[in-house]
């Protein structure tokens, strides 16, 4: 039996090759993430990242560092960490601190990593990740035509075969770009759309019809989250399967969405849910016949690896947004090759060991 000895935090600046644009004017250019380390009494350590997204969760580098140092770490230090059930219990305790999604998520991820090392097993084994191949998707910004097409070409050249394209800010422009993008990448590449709540009840059906005509397979959050009844009605009559993301940040929110039958596919983000809540959300969605995919919070390599690892669980039948590391300068170049749209679980495990060791050295 071992316990949590201490929690470590350290800001970590990242350099993007180009900014990411989405929604109603949101963008990400020079992110600073927070590395979160956990050390157990037996010396085992784990690490994860908390990505501050003020426009999504209201978190900043300063707020993440403060809430972990002042509220969450004191609740964890001295707690028993022996089985995965202990981690689920600790995560439930952390939810008494409301919001602070990625701060709590990073702690849960780091605790899983530390427990796996303490027990001498792989993190994949601990979380039940067994599928040998993991389909990968890539996020493509909204924006001007040539920038969007260039992002897509680079992702496909890197081996990605599923593209999640941000649309909605200027739909006529976005639709024309999507039409050209379909011609550019061909039928071998799957396209789906992320609207980030930018459509309205008045225009949503016509716009979904237009997307479906371009062989766009799924659509993420077309309507504002606050329009619950409208979203449920749309799902019952939508030409495209709908993906829940912003409407289901947590298990409690997911239960609301399931009660209203407002979506077809759940996008789980390990960066905001950790593994513990992600597993509970996966189980709840599957029990109601919903599909599951794994999303990204614009993660660096460690965040992508955690997402990909969760995507190797048998319940995840849709692609994993695990390629954002391709957008980061000098970031483990060549460490995780994508072949014909997928990565192999064995490669993910090897890369995770190297990245964890590298990041843990920063706390020494």
Image: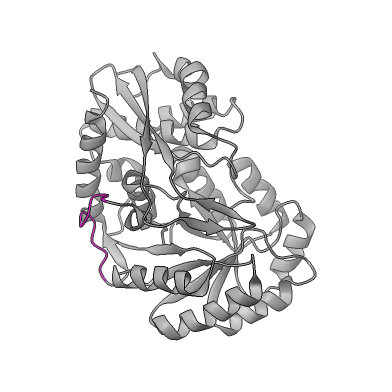
Where is residue 64? Give x, y as percent: 49, 29
Left or right of 174 in this view: 2: left
Left or right of 341 in this view: 277: right
Left or right of 133 in this view: 303: right
Against 162, is 214 above or below? below
How many labels were placed on the picture? 0
Residue 144 among those drawn in magenta:
no
Q: Is residue 254 visible?
A: yes
Residue at 19% from the left image edge and 42% from the top image edge:
354
Against 220, is 49 above or below? above
Where is residue 179? Give x, y as percent: 53, 83
Where is residue 263? Give x, y as percent: 64, 61
Q: Which residue is at the front of the view, 288 or 34?
A: 34
The picture quadrant where one finds residue 76 is top left
Span highlighted in magenta in the image: 330-339
Q: Which residue is at the front of the view, 208 or 312?
A: 208
Residue at 32% from the left image edge and 58% from the top image edge:
326
């Amino acid at each position: 039996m071992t316990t949590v000895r201490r929690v470590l935090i350290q800001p970590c600046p990242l350099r993007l090759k180009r900014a990411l644009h989405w929604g109603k004017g949101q963008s990400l250019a020079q992110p600073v993430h927070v590395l979160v380390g956990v050390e157990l009494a037996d010396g085992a350590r784990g690490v994860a990242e908390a990505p501050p997204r003020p426009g999504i969760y209201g978190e900043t580098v300063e707020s993440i560092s403060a809430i972990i140092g002042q509220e969450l770490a004191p609740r964890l230090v001295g707690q028993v960490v022996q089985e995965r059930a202990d981690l689920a219990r600790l995560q439930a305790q952390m939810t008494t601190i409301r919001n602070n999604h990625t701060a709590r998520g990073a702690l849960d991820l780091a605790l899983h990593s530390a427990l796996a090392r303490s027990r001498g097993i792989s993190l994949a084994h601990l979380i039940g990740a067994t599928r040998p191949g993991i389909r990968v998707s890539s996020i493509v910004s909204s924006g001007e035509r040539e920038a969007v097409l260039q992002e897509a070409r680079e992702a496909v050249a890197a081996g990605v075969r599923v593209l999640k394209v941000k649309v909605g800010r200027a739909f006529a422009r976005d639709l024309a770009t999507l039409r050209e993008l379909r011609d550019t990448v061909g039928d071998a590449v799957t396209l789906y759309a992320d609207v980030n709540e930018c459509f309205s009840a008045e225009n949503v059906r016509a716009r979904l019809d237009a997307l479906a005509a371009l062989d766009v397979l799924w659509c993420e959050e077309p309507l504002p989250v606050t329009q619950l009844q409208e979203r449920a009605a749309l799902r019952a009559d939508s030409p495209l399967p709908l993906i829940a993301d912003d409407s289901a940040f947590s298990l409690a929110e997911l239960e609301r969405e399931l009660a209203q039958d407002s979506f077809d596919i759940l996008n789980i983000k390990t960066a905001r849910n950790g593994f513990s809540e992600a597993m509970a959300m996966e189980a709840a969605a599957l029990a109601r016949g919903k599909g599951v995919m794994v999303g990204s919070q614009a993660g660096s390599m460690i965040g992508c690896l955690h997402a990909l690892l969760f995507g190797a669980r048998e319940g995840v039948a849709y692609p994993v947004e695990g390629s954002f590391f391709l957008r980061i300068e000098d970031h483990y170049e060549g460490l995780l090759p994508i072949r014909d749209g997928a990565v192999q679980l064995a490669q993910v495990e090897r890369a995770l060991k190297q990245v964890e060791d590298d990041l843990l050295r920063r706390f020494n």
